[in-house]
Image (cartoon, rainbow, N blue to C red):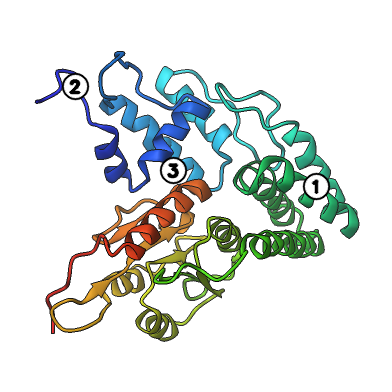
Amino acid sequence: MTEPSPGLTSGAVARRLGVAPTTLRSWDRRYGIGPAAHESGRHRRWTPGDIAVLQEMCRLTASGVPPAEAARAARAARSGAAPAALPTGEASTAPPAREQPLGDVRRELRGLGRAAVRLDSGAMDELLESVIARHGLVAAWEEVLAPALHAVGRKWETSEDRYVEVEHLLSWHVSTALRRVGAAGRTGPPEAGTPPVLLACVPNEQHTLPLEALAAGLAELGVPTLMFGAAVPPEALDQAVRRTGPAAVVLWAQARSTAHHPLARHVADASWGVRGARTRTAVLLAGPGWAGRTPGPGMLRPVGLRDALSLLHGLCAAARDGDGTAAPSGGP
């Protein structure tokens, strides 16, 4: 029966934006990014105005803005108020509406940045270990690690190539901390029949840390991964896909100049298996470089680490249980 309330369901909105429905629920619970009107006992319905707020939230988070700051700006746009200044290296001091408490992450963010500027390896290791243990990988990445890397990167860009050593050292220690999380999460061999998730940067893309964070999170979930790292040549990626039959392929692009849309289309169209029952893989377009274009068939665009983990966990479970989302190609 048709709902009398106007607007789209959460599932329809999630499909339109290329995000997981759990992400919409999380944004509403944590940041107040939900339907402006919600009648008790009825399914949630999203109006065009609500969807516009979500689109702004997606745009900001895809460009590297921390989720709490992006939510404040998106809500301000809906109300017509002047949005608060978005971070340019320093975290805001105002608490986000309806956000779950994360402790004094701003103090931890400042502490990590100062340790990096001092080139204090010991302090960075202690802070990174403490932040991840206290808040969990996803919150630590979104609220501390990624903002710290963003701030150091902006310092380098605006200081005539100073602080390069700071960025390199911080990146190394963040990478080391993420690998520790991944190693701790791998408590044994993956469940039989579970295909891996293939993680790769597109050609000419050198930024691997977001993929390393994703690999660590997947390890915590017990999802097997194959990490191919920076600037993977198209031919090598094609061979890896056909040899491993992955549950999903994640392609990272930091900038629009590196986003390789023909490659993404080629991977989404690749198939393997016996004639008449060939299989394709889902492709996740991760990173701000893919923003601004609607994902094609067989492609998803996750919004942040939490969304990517949710999508991949579901895809791997479906592939393991023999309930893949892609239909047989029917080709030769």
Q: Quadrant of the C terminus?
A: bottom left
Residue positioned most to the top = 40
In this figure, which residue is indicated by the disc labeled 3? Answer: 59
Residue 131 location (% of width, % of height): 75, 44
Point 43% across, 55% down: residue? 313
Q: In the drawing, does residue 117 fall left or right of residue 145?
A: right
Instruction: State the mark number for residue 112.
Output: 1
CA–CA distance in space, label 1 to label 3: 27 Å
Q: Which amino acid does label 3 sit on?
A: Arg
Q: Which amino acid does label 1 sit on?
A: Leu
Residue 119 seen in the figure: no
The one nearer the camera, 124 or 262, is 124
Residue 20 location (% of width, % of height): 37, 45
In this figure, which residue is indicated by the disc labeled 2? Answer: 6
Q: Which amino acid does label 2 sit on?
A: Pro
1 and 3 marks in contact (CB < 8 Å): no
